[in-house]
Image (cartoon, rainbow, N blue to C red):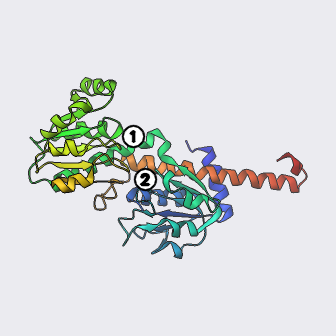
Amino acid sequence: MENPDFQQAEETCMKSDKVILVAGGDLRQQYAAQRLRQKTGAAVWTVGLPAQPNLHFAETPAEVPAYDVLVLPVLAGSSGETVPAPFGTSPLSLPELAAQGKPAALVAGGGCSGVAHWFEAAGMTVTDYLRREELCLANAVPTAEGAIRIAIEETARTLHGASALVVGYGRIGMALAPRLRALGMQTKICARRCETRALAQMQGFSAVPVSALAQRAAAADVIFNTVPVLLLSETVLKALPPETLVIDLASRPGGTDFDAAKRLGIRVVWALALPPEVRRCHIPEKAISAEFHRKNVEKSVESVLNSEKRLRNCEKATKTGIISSKEF
């Protein structure tokens, strides 16, 4: 059944000539752009994405007319001043994107709290759709698959028969560990909380506390870190054989002493913002993460469109004398 709130938002957008800009990211953004055009009838522009039928395409943010809604990708602000755009020639500048918005524009992005000031300074409203738990869970799947792809590309052996250590057993750890095991890797878990270790053990994994991290890491061929706290310290890294591969999936500041790893000759891949960082990783339109991303973008956009519709109705009622302007 069609969402009645979105039907109202659709009507509002069609009547008000809204401009929606979808900037950067992977194919999830492309699907969201097409869906927004179909659902709202607004002028939908893309930048940092491939040109698509029925959408306006821009090479740079400066080519886009002033927008009412800006849709940023998952982990939009992981690099501080730019948005990842693997389909473009370079990342997109956040200051340039902010300069193109209308003062009352809505900005929707994932993990964007660290860059919200670029837009809030201009009077825009910023909403973080990664606060929606269902999207975080869905996004863990392509992150896990992207991490596996990195492991395949960066190792000189098959993953089958190799040993893996997953540090942290949250959303990403729980998505990653069973996939590694399915590939034939001897997979073990390291987690800080005893209840988390109990959960991992209940699901058939060997789990150790952080106090045993150095010993367990020394026996692993590939280490996947998912915790944004410095756990892979210089002390732990010194225990690793030189051929060990460390894949750090944690958000900034990461969980690895990168300087120490460089001095010790330990290979570390800091894989921020997966899957876009994985060479334009293909995500089918019906993939679970793509579907949740599209729906969450819709919910973010419909909120601003419905707000404008209510304001327009109030203004109309005031002009016709149905209500007094003092009532709103």
Q: Which mark is residue 188?
A: none
Going from the N terminus, do you reach mark 1 or mark 2 first? Answer: 2
Amino acid type shown at disc 2:
Val
Asked if one can make out residue 99 in the rendered structure from this viewpoint, the answer is: yes
- Nearer the observer, 61 or 115: 115
Amino acid type at image mark 1? Leu
Residue situated in front as seen by the camera: 153 or 26: 153
Q: Is residue 53 left or right of residue 119?
A: left
Q: Specify the label residue 74 is tagged with.
A: 2
Quadrant where the image shows the N terminus: top right
Q: Position of residue 17 (x, y in %)?
A: 65, 66
Q: Which residue is mark 1?
A: 137
Quadrant for residue 5, please give it: top right
Classify mark 2: residues with Cα within 10 Å, few (<14), some (14-19) or many (20+): many
Q: Residues within 10 Å of mark 1 (few under 14, many from 20)?
A: some
Secondary structure category for the residue under label 2: loop
Cα separation between marks 1 and 2:
13 Å
- The x, y position of residue 176, in whole percent, is 27, 41
Of residues 174 and 167, the one nearer the viewer is: 167
* 211 left or right, relative to 48: left
Residue 316 lies in what quarter of the image?
bottom right
Percent of width and height locating residue 27: 38, 59
Q: Is 143 left or right of 71, judged from the image as shown? A: left
Q: Nearer the viewer, residue 112 or 280?
A: 112
Can residue 184 be seen in this snapshot? no
Horizontal and vertical percent position of residue 313? 77, 52
Label 1 close to label 2 by CB (< 8 Å):
no
